[in-house]
Image (tube, rainbow, N blue to C red):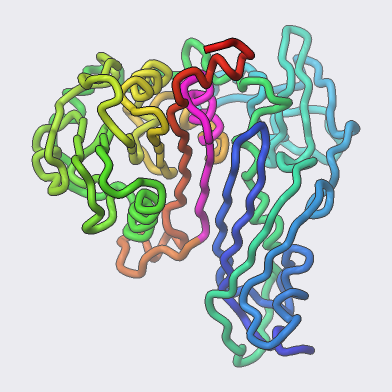
Amino acid sequence: MDVLDRCTADLAFTLRWRKDGVLHTECLFAARVNFWRDLLPPGVREGLAAGPGTRVVRLSFAPGALLPPRAAAQILRVPVGDFRGTLADGQAIVPRRGRFYPRGFLRGLPGVFPQNLIPFRCLEAGHEGLVADLNPPLAGIALELEAVVETLAEKAGERGGSAVDWTERLLEGPGMQARAGGAPTDFFTAEAFSRPDENDDALFYSRPRLVDHLDAFALAEVSRLYGRLLAPGGRVLDLMGSWSSHLPEGFPLAGLTVLGLNAQELAANPRADRRVLHDLNADPRLPFEAAAFDAVISTASFEYLVRPREVFAEVARVLRPGGLFVQVFSNRWFPPKAVRLWSELHEFERMGLVLEVFRDSGEYEGLETFSLRGRPRPAEDRYAGTIPHADPLYAVWGRKKAPGAAAREEGIRP
């Protein structure tokens, strides 16, 4: 037994990968890792044990090194009657190209029961059936992994308990936001952006909600992300904003415009120097001149947009070339006003939806995604006793292309 076997640690994992020109960063906090019992990604334990005081390990994994290689045998043709997916209300699910579904929806697979939630990807769908890809979402992709020791403490003794497979937890979800074979994912169906409550949004949001919709840790991380991405001294638009824009304290701006639906919430925003009442679902056109902003931010709001492609096109219009557009969200929302598709998607698939809207516009480049999971819930949070983890964060961003960039991509002289 070496020194690490006598210790537990809090580790921060960061996984980076690229696919189809998009950079993805996944952060997972691993609390109270038991080096004697738990399973870690290959090389992490060895790297930390390499020398006294080692606190950071960086590893590169070729495709097939951290998870099984992509295998043709894991791609199956499924007859139409062997897909039996239903929504919570009992409505039958129609499989869509590029989407993920639980394996339990498939009948006739050896060892797969209806309760199986491991996802598979639908590569093709038609009247005769579908093509199901059972490979892990990150199969065939090179990965970069960083593990940082945040705390290290010697155990008082060894107790019984189950082992945690931290590799499995790290890889649970990442990859689902990428396209399959470079083809667009079929998100945009006729019913996808309908909502349980189709009444006037102005009525629903008429009562001010001067409360935070995410926990304190998640909000601090939103602020930290904006502080990292935004350039000081810029003109910023907070889209679908409220009483807080979640910017770092004292962050210098040339101006902050907040667009939202409730006048009292907007009036309570201390950072705003311009407030605009506007319903993007009623009219996706933004009441601003072209190239009016250096950055547009939007926090926990994408899921309420019924015409997101039109809104993203408008955001591109009001951004200067090279301007930043950031969408941040979590796994909490107002169900009556969230679009139907949002609740049907895996949390990582939601980043794929936002990415698809960015790409569909043809106006953005430098696309990235970011996820943060597993941090402990703040002790003072009212759900601390029932929900162990802080609200997860997911973010997608891109920059407005310079004039002529789209034409150059098509091989056309601008």
Q: In which quarter of the image is the N terminus?
A: bottom right
Q: Can you name the residue that lies furthest to the top here?
A: 127
Residue at the spot 61% in from the left edge and 14% down from the top edge: 410
Task: Looking at the picture, tell me which residue is in the foreground, 232 or 218.
Answer: 232
Asked whether residue 174 is drawn in magenta, I would say no
Q: Is residue 332 shown left or right of residue 244?
A: right
Q: In this view, does 396 lie to the left or right of 244?
A: right
Between residues 364 and 148, which one lies in front from this camera angle? 364
Report how many numbered discs are placed on residues in the image: 0
At x 72%, y 66%, the residue is 40
Give the residue displayed 48% in from the left and 62% down from the top: 375
Residue 90 in view here: yes
* Residue 297 place in picture, x, y as percent: 33, 38
Find residue 189 and report its horizontal and vertical position in percent. Answer: 52, 13
As drawn, is 296 to the left or to the right of 388?
left
* Residue 408 lies in quadrant: top right
Q: Residue furthest right?
A: 73
Could you say where residue 172 lies in the image, as x and y percent from the top left?
A: 65, 49
Relative to residue 236, is residue 341 depicted above or below?
above
Indicate the quadrant where residue 381 lies: bottom left
**Residue 368 inside the magenta-drawn segment:** yes
User: Quick check: 22 left or right of 311?
Assistant: right
In this orientation, which residue lies closer to the viewer: 411 or 39?
Answer: 411
Q: Residue at x 75, y 81 (%)?
A: 50
Residue 341 shows up from this direction? no
Q: Where is residue 282 in the image (x, y as percent from the top left)?
A: 25, 15
| Residue closest to the far front | 413
Span colored in magenta:
351-374
